[in-house]
Amino acid sequence: MNPRPSKVDFAAPYDKLYTPEVGSWTKEKYRLFWCYADLFATSMKDKWDQRVYVDLFAGAGHVRVGENGPYLRGTPLLALRVVHPFDWYVFCDQDPNCISALRKRVERLRPSAEVRYVPGDVNHITSQLVKAMPPLGSGKKVLAFCFADPFRLRDLHFTTIRALAQRYMDFMVLIPAMDPRRNEATYLDPSSDVVDLFVGTPAWREEWGNKQNAMTFDTFVAEFFSGQISHLGYTHGGLQDSLLVRSTEKNLPLYRLGFYSRHELGKRFWKEARRYSNPQMDLL
């Protein structure tokens, strides 16, 4: 029997705490995230000693769609609300306002949850992130699911992914599309190292020279990034299985949600998550 995610209410109450604004397309991202997180947490609960959720850009726990739109639960609180909760949570954000609000919301929602907060720039505190995860022991199996939601390419370095990939971990990564489209000339300038850091090597420049007539720059960056992750032993997912999210107003490409797993089960969950995150499916 194929797994199926449980129903969820994305709506969040107004609680007077700090709440960032997001675009109208955010709920599409949250639907896919929820479907995968719930399938992952439920299906792995009897197969691993501990299941860990890692959120690299956790935010404040709640968001608001525009200035006057609805309030929604963000990925940290959605991960806390899966039917079979993770055994351990690691939340990182460099905005102290986000960390403060997130702490209070987590304490209200699940005060007994095993949560570690790691404030700061994720690319500069990677060792602290790894230490915040449950320690490995003899015969102790720990599996993690990491969600990375950078706003721009410069916000995520491949060295961070590489360090976390030393653990057994699935990744869902938001790969910006609008950012490299708008800043293509800037990023192609030899003085810029933004793409170098995002994909982990300056070797992308030579490959782009061979492919620039065959694809857009944002597609190339996503493809190269996915190829780099495959070198870490991730055999399932990648650009071919990513979801391209477009803006509501002008239908412009905003970002791709890429998925990466070392196990065939991960691909199965991703396939089911893609299926059930269709807005026509009843998840509310």
Image (cartoon, rainbow, N blue to C red):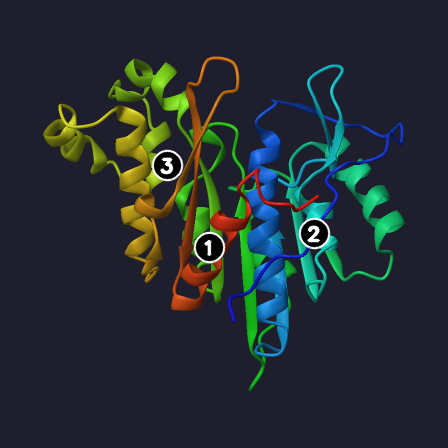
Quadrant in which the C terminus is drawn: top right
Q: Which residue is mark 2?
A: 7
Discs 2/3, front = 2
33 versus 211 height, above or below: below
Q: Earlier in the sequence, mark 2 or mark 3?
A: 2
Residue 14 lies, in percent from the top left, at: 86, 29
Q: Residue 270, which numbered label?
A: 1
Q: Looking at numbered disc 2 in the image, what kind of residue is underneath it?
A: Lys
Q: Is residue 36 left or right of residue 115?
A: left
Q: Nearer the viewer, residue 250 or 76?
A: 250
In this view of the protein, which residue sits in the foreground, 204 or 70?
70
Kindly identify the residue that appears in the image at 55 percent across and 68 percent down: 143
Answer yes or no: is residue 127 visible: no
Sequence order check: which comes first, mark 1 or mark 2?
Answer: 2
Which image quadrant for residue 99? top right
The residue wearing badge 3 is 197
